[in-house]
Image (tube, rainbow, N blue to C red):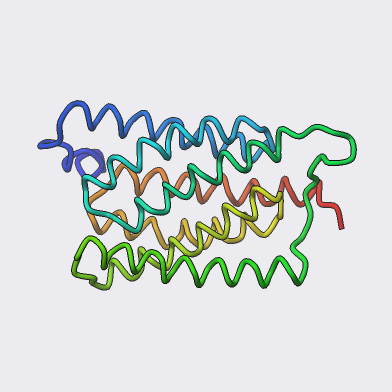
Amino acid sequence: MIDFLFSQYKEVSTQNIILEFIAFVFGLVSVFYAKKRNVLVYPTGLVATIISVYLLYKANYFGDMTMNFYYSIMSIYGWIIWSNTSENKVVSISKINFKEKIIGIILFLLTLVFTYLIYQFFEYEIELLNYIDILTSGIFFTAMWYMAKKKIENWTLWIIGDIITVPLYAYRGLGMLALQYLIFTIIAIYAYKEWKKNLVN
């Protein structure tokens, strides 16, 4: 197990290992804060996503790179919304309505197209794993938008995306990231249960 998690780092520069470890830690901290509905989910998440954009670009994982770039933008957006403590504007946990469901579907489909075009832009040969990467990008993009709106469905999407991503990263030999997304899955399940207790119908 230890060899699986760390053998792929034998030829990786010390700088990249340190950066990946920092992203790993801040990513876990961010999801923990999301579970607690704490605004610190966003600044901690920004650290993880900005570092991930750099590392994934170097690794030629353009779908994942685009996903993390989007996370960075949505983290700023969500940070602003969650920081608004005005009595009339504070965002409560709720379910998506019909309009938000349609927007989510459109966002998902646009993300699929956009991520595919990113691969085309970098002239990267698209294989099965890349199509799975494109699919999870759409799921995660939509989940991030719902999270910013404090919609409970965001956790359902995170769970689905995480379950797909764990074996994907494991197959790629990215043991540390596979472990991270396994932990994300567990936290997301507990987060869904906790948010449900505070759901405004």
**In the depicted structure, whether residue 100 falls above or below residue 69:** below
Instruction: Give x and y (percent) for residue 77.
Output: 61, 43
Residue 1 shown left or right of residue 187 in the figure: left
**In the depicted structure, whether residue 41 falls above or below residue 120:** above
Which one is in front, 156 or 6? 156
Number of disc labels: 0
Residue drawn 61% across and 30% down? 40
Residue 138 shown left or right of residue 130 in the figure: right
Residue drawn 81% across and 39% down? 90
Which one is in front, 141 or 177? 141
Instruction: Give x and y (percent) for residue 67.
Output: 42, 53
**In the depicted structure, whether residue 59 falls above or below residue 46:** below
Name the residue furthest front: 121
Instruction: Give x and y (percent) for residue 185.
Output: 51, 51
Q: Quadrant of the C terminus?
A: bottom right
Name the residue furthest left: 11
Residue drawn 33% across and 31% down? 21
Instruction: Give x and y (percent) for residue 36.
Output: 68, 36
Residue 197 shown left or right of residue 16 in the figure: right
Which one is in front, 80 or 170? 80
Residue 184 shown left or right of residue 21 in the figure: right
**In the depicted structure, whether residue 201 falls above or below residue 41:** below
Q: Quadrant of the N terminus?
A: top left
Name the residue furthest right: 88
Residue drawn 42% across and 31% down? 25
